[in-house]
Image (spheres, rainbow, N blue to C red):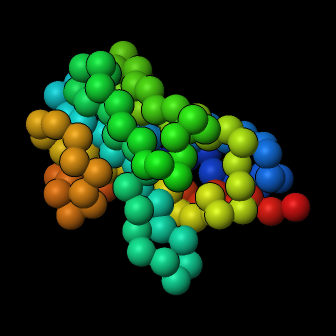
Amino acid sequence: QVQLVESGGGLVQPGGSLRLSCAASGFTLDYFAINWFRQAPGKEREGVSCIGSSGGSTYYADSVKGRFTISRDNAKNTVYLQMNSLKPEDTAVYSCGIERGSCSLSYYGMDFWGKGTLVTVSA
């Protein structure tokens, strides 16, 4: 079965860290760019970060630049999003999506997406 499964979400205090994982099964991530998106209640979905198929290109939304780091481990068929210095405004459901070619950070340009993992930043 082809799927993407996100994990690593949870409750964290402001200033804390979490590492999200996006694990693929049923196919290899090697030839895809991987995007992370988030959607907070009542807000539009936002493209957070993307990593190219080779891992040599990474992109970040201005809102997370300098705090989040995307990486990939093709041997584990997994992409990670390390989130540091978390803020309450980072609270959202985070999901990953794959696309062929270059990073677009466009949700509806993805080949498919995972179901997401909830991140809550609160004291």
Percent position of residue 20, x then y: 56, 41
Q: How many marks?
A: 0
Residue 22 located left or right of residue 110: right
Q: Is residue 58 above or below residue 6?
A: above
65 sits to left or right of 90 = left
Determine the residue located farthest toward the right in the rendered image. 123
Name the image quarter holding residue 44. bottom left
Pick the front one: 117 or 3: 117
Which quadrant, please, contains the C terminus? bottom right
Q: Is residue 89 left or right of residue 110?
A: right
Q: Residue furthest left?
A: 101
Q: In which quadrant of the rendered view does residue 106 lie?
A: bottom left
Q: Residue at x 17, y 52 (%)?
A: 111
Residue drawn at the location 54% of the way across and 46% of the way down: 64
> 109 or 27, which is in the foreground?
109
| In the depicted structure, whether residue 59 falls above or below residue 95 | above
- Can residue 112 be seen by looking at this rendering? no
- The single residue placed furthest to the front in the displayed view is 62
Rendered image quadrant of residue 56: top left
Q: Compared to 31, does 60 lie above or below?
A: below
Q: Is residue 117 visible?
A: yes
Picture coordinates of residue 65, whole percent (x, y): 52, 40
Residue at the spot 24% in from the left edge and 36% down from the top edge? 33
Q: Residue 88, how many percent across, how many down?
A: 72, 62
Residue 113 percent coordinates (x, y): 31, 56
